[in-house]
Amino acid sequence: MNIYWQSNQDMSAVVDSSVQLCLMSPPQPMQYDSVYMDSYIDYNIMILQKVNNKLKPKGILCFVTTDNYHSGTLVLRHAMFLKAIKDAGFNVFSIKIWSRGDFVELYRPSFSYIIMASKEKSKSLETVNKMHKAPFGWDVWKITDEYKLWKQYSAFPAELAQRCIECFTNPGDTVLDPYSGTGTTPICAHKMGRIGIGYELDASLLKAFEDRCKEIRIVKSSEIQSLGSFV
């Protein structure tokens, strides 16, 4: 497992065409005016293009995002990112709703989106059939978030990372998270026998990362059939 405490603008340590899965969730925007939001989306298109270069030809992107309430308006970040993902050259093949639990928040809905995209432009019938295997095939993923982590770091739960990793990778594959945060993705990947790589600019999260390494436990799901190289 490699965690780089630096900007994700430089991911040169990761070999091009070497990553099977990128699981990422960009931080929430600091402002919501049009100038800032344009810059926010442009930056993430740049990161997505870099991710595209790092993915294997049959590599997969799982992009987690949540809409926000701001000044009496629902900011549709998932719609902005859908366009950004396509602009970065990806083929969106599925969208899952992650139901985070039965609670109400003032600033965002209690559900998020998991946008699934491939580097390839289309998928085979065999792959489509595999995608209907439960629980991968369910359109709503009911995974209770780890509320303290979500509230403090907007970190998604280990179970979500585990499900994506188990579905789209095999042991020995490389899994990348360019917004690693507290390290959920690379830690899960490492504990599942994959090569976990993360980038995080905020080095103050090091202690939270170390705690997360101790806390995360992997429980293999007998219901999930690995999609392997996703051919």
Image (cartoon, rainbow, N blue to C red):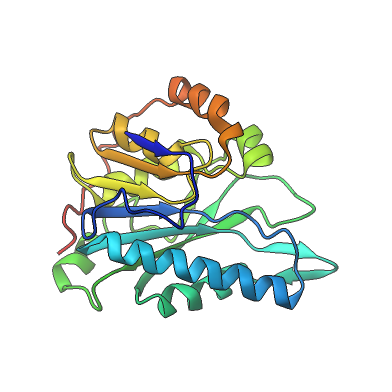
- Location of residue 187 in the rendering, given as x and y in whole percent from the top left corner: 38, 33
- Residue 57, quarter of the rendered image: bottom left
91, 174: nearer the viewer = 174
Q: In the figure, 40 relative to 181: above or below?
A: below
Residue 12 relative to residue 155: left or right: left
- Residue at x 26%, y 39% (from the top left corner): 195
- Residue at x 53%, y 71% (from the top left corner): 81
Residue 216 can be seen, yes or no: yes
Q: In the figure, 55 relative to 180: above or below?
A: below
- Location of residue 180 in the rendering, given as x and y in whole percent from the top left corner: 47, 44
- Location of residue 7 in the rendering, given as x and y in whole percent from the top left corner: 50, 50
The total of numbered circles placed on residues is 0
- Residue 4, quarter of the rendered image: top left
Residue 95 can be seen, yes or no: no
Quadrant containing the C terminus in the rendered view:
bottom left
Residue 103 relative to residue 227: left or right: right
Residue 22 relative to residue 30: left or right: left
11, 124: nearer the viewer = 11
